[in-house]
Amino acid sequence: KHWRNVGLAFNCIFLLFGSVIQLIACASNIYYINDNLDKRTWTYIFGACCATTVFIPSFHNYRIWSFLGLVMTTYTAWYLTIAAILHGQMEGVKHSGPNKMVLYFTGA
């Protein structure tokens, strides 16, 4: 019973850290697309959207949401791939990103 509790605590802690990192990454990515709001506000928006999955009433409905998420992720990937092939990269584009590990994880 002791190891079950240790395993449960381990999984909960790493799921929490993983979800926080994912929210920060989503907010950072969307900030590059739309910088009308700051990254912290985008993090709150994504957090609110993701929190709605807590209210899914049954596992059957969760499978529907998971399938829908896979379909939308695939659609987005193909859309971006086709757009990149058709339009290419514009001249003079400079890509910027965090240059330190701490800046990556804080969304700065």
Image (spheres, rainbow, N blue to C red):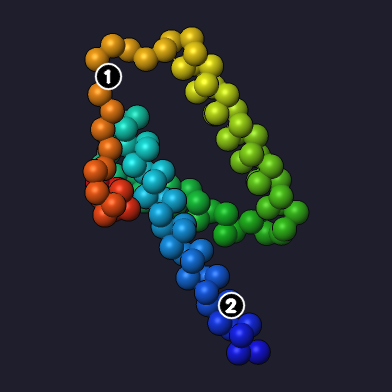
Residue 7's mark?
2
Q: Residue at x 57, y 24 (%)?
A: 78
Q: Earlier in the sequence, mark 1 or mark 2?
A: 2
Residue 57's mark?
none
How busy is the neighbourhood of tag 2: few (under 14 within 10 Å), some, or many (20 plus)? few
> Residue 71: x, y in percent?
65, 34
Q: Is residue 18 above or below residue 78?
A: below
State the SS at label 1: loop
Q: Is residue 45 visible?
A: no
State the SS at label 2: helix
Give the side of residue 1 with respect to residue 93, left or right.
Answer: right
Q: Is residue 19 above or below residue 95?
A: below
Q: Residue at x 55, y 70 (%)?
A: 11
The part of the image, by quadrant, that contains residue 54 is bottom right
Q: Residue at x 42, y 12 (%)?
A: 88
Q: Is residue 17 visible?
A: yes
Instruction: Return the residue at label 1.
Output: 93
In front: 54, or 26?
A: 26
Give the side of residue 33 with respect to residue 19, left or right.
Answer: left
Q: Is residue 38 above or below residue 85?
A: below
How far apart are the two marked residues, 1 and 2, measured between alpha carbons?
47 Å
Q: Amino acid at mark 1?
A: Val
In front: 52, or 7?
A: 7
> Residue 14: x, y in percent?
49, 66
Give the side of residue 74 with respect to residue 63, left or right.
Answer: left
How busy is the neighbourhood of tag 1: few (under 14 within 10 Å), some, or many (20 plus)? few
The part of the image, by quadrant, that contains residue 34 is top left
> Residue 93: x, y in percent?
27, 19
Q: Amino acid at mark 2?
A: Gly
Q: Residue at x 65, y 89 (%)?
A: 1
Q: Is residue 6 above or below residue 100?
A: below
